[in-house]
Image (tube, helix red, strand yellow):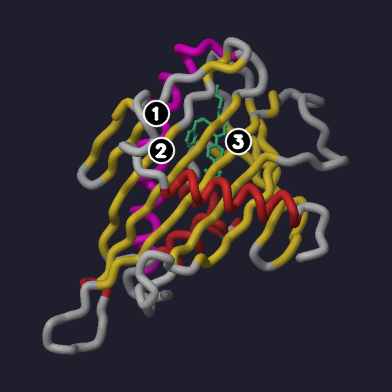
Amino acid sequence: ACQHRLWPEIESVVKQQVAWARTGIGECGQGWQLFAEDGEMRMYRREEEVDGMAVDPLKAVHTVPGITGHEVCHYFFGPQYRYDWETTLEQMTVLETVSDDTLVFLQTHKRIWPASQRDVLFWSHMRKLPNENDRDGPDLWTVVNNSTTHLDYPPNVGKCVRIYLKVCLLCQTRVDPPKDGAPLTRDNISCKITYCSVVNPGGWAPASVLRAVYKREYPKFLKRFTAYVVNQTKNKPIMF
Ligand SMILES: CCCCCc1ccc(-c2ccc(S(=O)(=O)CCO)cc2)cc1[C@H]1C[C@H]1c1ccccn1
């Protein structure tokens, strides 16, 4: 995979996205609005427009007991699970298997009235990262999704407007070992999740419609996805 045409871009985008995900909300400077809260989940957005279109950056943080960062990234990255948790997905195709940790997807999402239907073409890369802050702590895991091109699927040819996105899911496992030195169970682990996304809707869509869609869909997506991972892993050995 190191000699693949996408490799240089993957390297630089992953480093940039992970650094961005690691930057706390406070450090990011002002402009972040908390727009959704549910238990441990906090969702922030910043109102930004490009060519009159809302492309509001989103940053969500969540802590989920009983699962690891590797498990969260495994179920987010794997195409075989996506229809189970991605409610707005209409069609998903793996266009290219670059390597076992890098895929190219084409997805069409359900049309959201009154905007026209959207599709998105992106590479998706999953990677384990060394835990810089705590050398003997568990590693971090990340999945980065970044819009790309594919000669056979030029944008805006069919009925769908091509959107452009950059997404980073960064996961940090936390282990609280049992006092009595008993073996680890899922009661002793939790995962701190940071989900960052910037979605450019491609063609025109009213900012009010886009903002209403994001406000409704993002909290739903993160809650449904994390509940899915808890349910899929609860009777399986812990995947660190
Ligand atoms: C007028 C609406 C235009 C935008 C429609 C649209 C398209 C793609 C996407 C999207 C595509 C990929 C990702 S992901 O994180 O890489 C996971 C893999 O699927 C995430 C979100 C979102 C939305 C917007 C529905 C809104 C929405 C928001 C969160 C989740 C689902 N839907």
Residue occupying the point 27% across, 72% down? 175
Q: Which residue is mark 3?
A: 165
Specify the segment rendered in magenta: 205-233
Whether the residues at callouts 1 and 2 have beta carbons within 8 Å, the answer is yes
For label 2, the crowd category at 10 Å Cα-Cα, with few meaning under 14, some 14 to 19 and many 20 or more, is many
Decide whether residue 225 is among the magenta residues.
yes
The amino acid pointed to by label 3 is Leu
Q: Which residue is mark 1?
A: 45
For label 3, the crowd category at 10 Å Cα-Cα, with few meaning under 14, some 14 to 19 and many 20 or more, is some
Where is residue 124? Give x, y as percent: 63, 52
Q: Nearer the viewer, residue 186 or 23?
A: 23
Residue occupying the point 68% across, 49% down? 123
Tag 2's secondary structure? strand
Q: CA gap, disc 2 to disc 3?
A: 14 Å
Q: Which residue is mark 2?
A: 59
Q: CA gap, disc 1 to disc 2?
A: 6 Å
Tag 1's secondary structure? strand
Q: Which of the 4 image quarters holds residue 166?
A: top right
The amino acid pointed to by label 1 is Arg
